[in-house]
Image (cartoon, grey):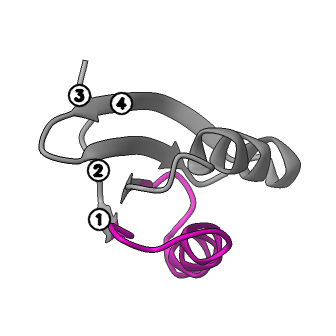
């Protein structure tokens, strides 16, 4: 299932901690209830983004790994 989203954050090619730092800014700029989609290539986001959501109280709606030319990790996060 692919979620709809209000904001798209492409962190392709960035490594820890940059994807989570950029997500923090995107969430701060979003309104409550809006969904931010994150696309990443750093496998550490599989650990970092769920922890980010849990710690700050945002809802991780979906996480998906897409195996293509490069491994992509996609996340849909609803701001609390």
Image point (31%, 45%), residue name: 72
Mark 4 and mark 3 residues within 8 Å of each other at the beta carbon: no
What's the distance in space between the residues labelled 4 and 3, CA to CA? 12 Å
Image point (51%, 69%), residue name: 31
Image point (58%, 36%), residue name: 60
User: Dot 1 surroundings within 10 Å: few (below 14), some, or many (20 or more)?
Assistant: some
What's the distance in space between the residues labelled 4 and 2, CA to CA? 17 Å
Q: Earlier in the sequence, mark 4 or mark 2?
A: 2
Mark on residue 5?
Answer: 2
Secondary-structure class at tag 2? loop
User: Dot 3 surroundings within 10 Å: few (below 14), some, or many (20 or more)?
Assistant: few
Secondary-structure class at tag 1? strand
What's the distance in space between the residues labelled 3 and 1, CA to CA? 13 Å
Residue 11 on the magenta segment:
yes
**Residue 1 or 64: which is nearer the viewer?**
64
Range drawn in magenta: 10-36
Q: Which residue is mark 3?
A: 2
Say left or right for 1 vs 16: left
What's the distance in space between the residues labelled 1 and 2, CA to CA? 7 Å
Say left or right for 2 vs 45: left
Say left or right for 52 vs 13: right
Q: Which residue is mark 4?
A: 65
């Amino acid at each position: 299932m692919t979620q709809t989203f209000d904001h798209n954050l492409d962190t392709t090619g960035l490594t820890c901690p940059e994807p989570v730092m950029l997500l923090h800014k995107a969430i701060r700029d979003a309104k409550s209830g809006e969904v931010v989609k994150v696309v990443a290539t750093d496998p550490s986001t599989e650990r970092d983004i769920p922890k980010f959501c849990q710690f700050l109280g945002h809802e991780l709606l979906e996480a998906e790994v897409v195996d293509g030319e490069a491994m992509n990790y996609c996340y849909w996060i609803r701001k609390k």
